[in-house]
Image (tube, coloured by chain):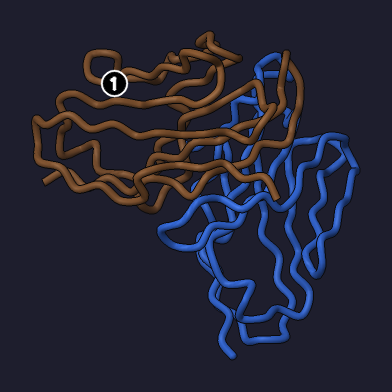
Amino acid sequence: SQELEQSPQSLIVQEGKNLTINCTSSKTLYGLYWYKQKYGEGLIFLMMLQKGGEEKSHEKITAKLDEKKQQSSLHITASQPSHAGIYLCGADLSGGTSYGKLTFGQGTILTVHP
Amino acid sequence: EAEVAQSPRYKITEKSQAVAFWCDPISGHATLYWYRQILGQGPELLVQFQDESVVDDSQLPKDRFSAERLKGVDSTLKIQPAELGDSAMYLCASSPANGPGIYEQYFGPGTRLTVT
């Protein structure tokens, strides 16, 4: 089984709707990263969360790391077609002892219909 | 805006041939990572460098894969001989990490390898 589980695996929404993607770990997360990827391209850095309870926003995207640091959520408000793509969570599961080695979830495919 | 550069963007090679990928990290970033991403999955770390030294290559198939970062700047990942199962996206990333800790990590555009 995956060390990082993302849900849902895919999501189809109408433009303007809000949505949430979850990333859950069986281990404590010492750094939680959210990336966006368009098919066949590299990963675009969105946000990095370190502290339990931390919340960051970038434009209409907000990410939170829960207090127990084993789950993160990514929330998109008023989705647009430009938000479509694959969202990946990555995490340091080494206890903060690595030089940034990340383990990734399997990704969530987001489709936004105009 | 500084970016991680990779080349080539696409590579088609025949089984048993040798193939090489190049990565130039963001200037000043001490740590460089090579990941492999199979279609429909998240990236998996192959090898990690701190300057010119390998920090982690536990997931690198060393019988056919090699990686180097001779001057601690750009890096090359080589596969010899290539196998059908090596078809994937090869992603390079860099971060300013100079020790254990949490750092922002930036990815290049990737090299899509197809082995026929």
Residue beneath the point at 60% across and 25% down: A101
Extreme residue toward the bottom, this view: A114
Task: Give x and y (percent) for residue A48.
Answer: 76, 42
Chain B as rendered: colour: brown
Q: Nearer the viewer, residue B51 or B64?
A: B51
Task: Give x and y (percent) for residue A1.
Answer: 46, 36
Task: Give x and y (percent) for residue B80.
Answer: 19, 23
Indicate the chain on which mark 1 is placed: B
Extreme residue toward the top, this view: B53
Residue beneath the point at 55% across and 39% down: A104
Question: On screen, A50 above or below A43?
Answer: above
Question: On screen, B45 above or below A7?
Answer: above
Q: Quadrant of residue A26?
A: top right
Residue beneath the point at 25% across and 47% down: B11
Q: Quadrant of residue B27?
A: top right
**Residue type indicated by callout 1:** Phe
**Circle 1 Cα neighbour tier, 10 Å, few/some/many (<14 / 14–19 / ≥20):** some
Residue beneath the point at 32% across and 18% down: B66
Name the residue carrying label 1. Answer: B65
Question: On screen, A81 above or below B15?
Answer: below
Residue A52 located left or right of residue B54 = right
Residue B114 located left or right of residue B70 = left
Callout 1: helix, strand or loop?
Answer: strand
Number of on-image labels: 1
Task: Give x and y (percent) for residue A99.
Answer: 66, 19
Residue A24 located left or right of residue B59 = right
Question: On screen, A83 above or below A112?
Answer: above
Chain A as rendered: colour: blue
Q: Quadrant of residue A24?
A: top right
